[in-house]
Amino acid sequence: MKPTRARASEVAALLRDAARAEIMPRFRRLAPDAVRAKTGPLDLVTEADEAAERVIEAGLARLFPGCVVVGEESASADASILHRLADADCAFVVDPVDGTANFAAGVPLFGCMAAMFLRGEVVAGWIHDPLGDDTAIALRGEGAWVEDSAGATHGAMRVAAPVPVSRMVGAVSWNWMPEPLRSQVPGRLPRLAAAVAYRCAAHEYRLVAGGHAHLLVYNRLLPWDHAPGWLLHAEAGGYSARFDGKPFDPARHRDGGLICAPDRASWEAAREALIR
């Protein structure tokens, strides 16, 4: 059941169709009652998220009969379905609009993501950019690349070459960190060349997997936010691990932090500079 490149392109087309039909027509056209908070003011959902998730779920069921689909919005309503990512023969996690706060504010920086699990192992990941209308795709053991709206591939994605910490550019999400890290890490960001915060993991992962920055640091590890980009980064040649140095398992881990870097030596240097 491991997807071929042809099947990967079919999933990319599904995400593209959902974005064109349900996401982009609502961009900068949301009514006030089409946006609401879930767990708090930083956790929003819009009617575009819900509509796109329904379209993607139905499409995946057609492409992969019998698969389990765990969408961000369905999991928000029933967190118990998350365990199915580790147990199912074939499962997908879907983030219909990653960067919902940007989308709701009319900021053109959001993405549509999915990842495929076979018996708990991530074997494929997709990050679609609705505005650029292209999709970053990763298949386990086969690399990562960008596919345009015509299905043409535009070169392999590769992480940046290693550099000293003082020359690293990274996306560092500190707001979900527990104390004392929440207070400590922001004060250490000047040790980097620059830090960015897109409020959108989809574009942060694409940035780093494409070699345009060096570092990603996250604390909250929800599978729809990280499974697609984590595989993209790995297949682009990067190294990642949790804050304690242990491997990240997107099907099971929800916390413990994650650092993504060009190689292990860069990872060690970044952890020393920011976390220890």
Image (tube, rainbow, N blue to C red):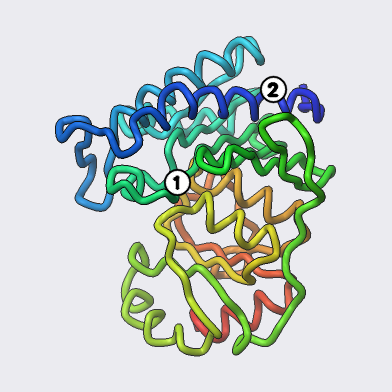
Q: Is residue 41 above or below residue 158?
A: above
Q: Residue at x 51, y 41 (%)?
A: 131
Relative horizontal placement of residue 259, taking residue 264 as reference (left or right):
left
Mark before the other along the chain sequence, 2 or 1 = 2
Report the residue marked by disc 1. Answer: 110
Residue 74 vertical placement versus 140 (above, below):
above
Disc 2 residue type (three-letter): Glu
**Secondary element type, mark 1:** loop
Asked whether 162 or 107 is in front, the reply is 107
Image position, residue 146 (x, y; %): 72, 44
Residue 238 vs 145, above or below: the answer is below
Name above or below for residue 24 compared with residue 68: below
Q: CA distance from mark 2 to mark 1?
A: 21 Å
Which image quadrant for residue 48? Answer: top left
> Dot 2 corresponds to which residue?
10
Q: Nearer the viewer, residue 259 or 146?
A: 146
Quarter assignment of residue 31 = top left
For the residue carrying disc 2, how many other residues have a C-alpha within 10 Å: few (<14), some (14-19), or many (20+)? some
Residue 169 position, x and y percent, is: 57, 76
Q: Secondary structure at mark 2?
A: helix
Q: How far across and how far down the image is residue 115, in percent?
A: 61, 36
Please give the name of the residue rendered at 61% of the width and 80% of the height, measured from the top-left corner.
168
Q: The N terminus is located in which quarter?
A: top right
List x then y, in percent, for residue 220: 42, 56
Q: Nearer the viewer, residue 51 or 218?
A: 51
Q: Amino acid at mark 1?
A: Phe
